[in-house]
Image (tube, rainbow, N blue to C red):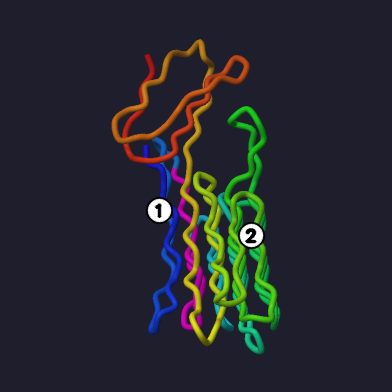
Amino acid sequence: MTVGGGGAGGTSTSPGTTATNGSNSVFSTITSTGGGGGGNDTTNGATGGSGGGAGYLKTGGTGTANQGYAGGNGNGGPKFPGGGGGGAGAVGGNATTTNGGNGGNGVATSISGSSVTYAGGGGGGTEGGGTAGTGGTGGGGAGNTDNSTNPVAGTANTGGGGGGGGISAANPPNGAQGGSGVVILRYLTTAGTITIGSGLTGSTSTSGSYTIATITAGTGNVSWS
């Protein structure tokens, strides 16, 4: 088992770097693909579990079937905004000439015993005077508009995307980090007792007749007895 980490945001210092994809979360034969990194003024958004939003006049990345949706497209002047990242439940919004695209919404599940939404896309950034995109429901971070604030990171253990950095002549901010993943195992308590092995960070709780094991970081094995 592996719990995937969130991808790093792109850097703005010339010549800058593009954002990186998140890493995959894996349990047995099931793989949840890490989210695609956002693009900039020279690259499209990356393909991933959900696609990364694009920068200036570029195209959002594609998502993975049955996992997530495409990122939104970037736009041109006067504010050069970026598209929103795709979410598990909806595409990322395309940027307008002044506003960054909103992140696509995630998907809610009650596997933990209560409804929680995961894997929202990050909002696109824009130049000062425009409006940055909001993060999608499910841990997506908002973009930013200038160098006075930073874009918002994706929420840890939701797989939410980080917000995009806007354009500013003085000190353009970097994109924000994506949120890490989580692996949740739900099983009948009468089936046995789980052991969370070395290398994994996790906890257990109960919901009615079920035990819920929530693994929040690491790589290792689980077993039942």
Q: Position of residue 27 (x, y in %)?
A: 41, 37
In the picture, residue 81 is in which quadrant?
bottom right
Instruction: Point out which mark residue 23 bears.
Output: 1
Q: Amino acid at mark 1?
A: Ser
Chain part drawn in magenta: 31-47
Q: Residue at x 55, y 65 (%)?
A: 62
Residue 30's place in the image compared with 125, above or below, is: above
Compared across the picture, whether 99 is left or right of 22 comes to right
Residue 150's place in the image compared with 193, above or below, is: below
Q: Earlier in the sequence, mark 2 or mark 1?
A: 1
Instruction: Point out which mark residue 135 bears.
Output: 2
Question: Can I make out residue 64 in this image?
Answer: no
The stretch drawn in magenta includes residue 37: yes
The rendered magenta stretch, by its main secondary structure, is classed as loop
Q: Position of residue 51 (x, y in %)?
A: 54, 63
Quadrant housing the N terminus: top left
Q: Position of residue 134 (x, y in %)?
A: 67, 63
Compared across the picture, whether 141 is left or right of 44 comes to right
Please tell me which residue lies in front, 44 or 147: 147
